[in-house]
Every structure is written in structure tokens, then in C-alpha cells.
Image (cartoon, grey):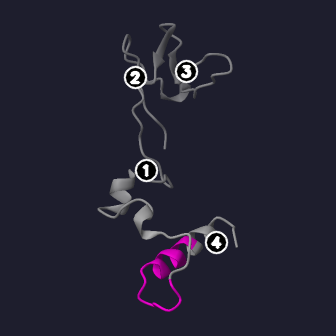
Amino acid sequence: MSRSCECPKCGADVSDTYEGEDYSCGITAGWFCGACDLGIGDDGHYEPMEGDVPIMTAKEFRGGRPLGTPLSELSSQPGDPKNLSDPRHAGYAEFCRIARSWGYD
């Protein structure tokens, strides 16, 4: 998919002269009209291409769900073994699950 551009001075099609940015030598992306000796900067407009990965915010991705686990739902100590309804049991299990996901035993 080629990006098209016309010279603003003479109206010539300069689409085939597009060069990407090369910051190592201070060149930004754009086109060049040889007839007018005019550089035409890329205005930053991006045309989507096949295979592009969509970029979205965390809110768009997760919706109303919180990002991560609230600290109040975690526990670094197991609950009372005699009281199975102790909420620390679930918090400790979630704590261990997260620790395992980071490579800890």
C-alpha cells in the first residue's frame, strides 16, 4: 500500500520519493519534489495497513473491571485453619497465584 503525495508547488505526483525517518542523520519522513527542489514533510497522518495491531487504552480493553487485584483482596498469610470461611484463605490463594505468575514458588 503506497502513500500518495502531490507537490504543493507544482502539483506533480511525488509518491515514489517517500523516505522514512532516519534520526541517525537528522532526516524526518517525507517526500521530495526534484523539479521544485522542495522537501515535503510527512504530517504524521497514518494510513492503516494490513496486519496492524490495534492500540487501545486499558479502559477500552478491560471496560469497568479494575486493573489488577485490589490490595484489600490479598493476604500474605493463610487464614485460620479452624475457620474455613475466613476471607484470608481466598486472599492467600490469590496472593500465591500472582506470585506463581511472576515465577515465585
Proximity of marks 1 and 3: CB atoms separated by less than 8 Å: no
Which amino acid lies under the numbered mark 4 shown in the image of this protein?
Arg
Residue extent of the magenta highlight: 80-95
Residue occupying the far left of the picture: 64
* Mark 4 Cα shell of 10 Å, populated few (<14), some (14-19), many (≥20): few
Proximity of marks 3 and 2: CB atoms separated by less than 8 Å: no
- C-alpha span from label 1 to label 4: 28 Å
* For residue 82, above or below residue 73: below
Q: Which residue is mark 4?
A: 100
| Quadrant containing the C terminus in the rendered view | bottom right
Answer with left or right where residue 64 lies relative to residue 29. Answer: left
Q: Is residue 34 magenta?
A: no
Q: Along the polypeptide, which appears first: circle 1 or circle 2? A: 2
Proximity of marks 1 and 2: CB atoms separated by less than 8 Å: no
- C-alpha span from label 3 to label 2: 18 Å
Q: Nearer the viewer, mark 3 or mark 4?
A: 4
Q: Along the polypeptide, which appears first: circle 3 or circle 4? A: 3
Q: Which residue is mark 1?
A: 55
Residue at 48% in and 54% down: 53
- C-alpha span from label 1 to label 2: 30 Å
- C-alpha span from label 3 to label 4: 45 Å
Which amino acid lies under the numbered mark 1 shown in the image of this protein?
Ile
* Mark 1 Cα shell of 10 Å, populated few (<14), some (14-19), many (≥20): few
Between 8 and 20, which is closer to the camera in this rendering? 20
Q: Which residue is mark 2?
A: 6
Please tell me the numbered disc located at residue 28. Answer: 3
Residue 28: percent from the left, percent from the top? 55, 21
Q: Along the polypeptide, which appears first: circle 1 or circle 3? A: 3
- C-alpha span from label 1 to label 3: 23 Å
Between 16 and 44, which is closer to the camera in this rendering? 44
Dot 4: element: helix
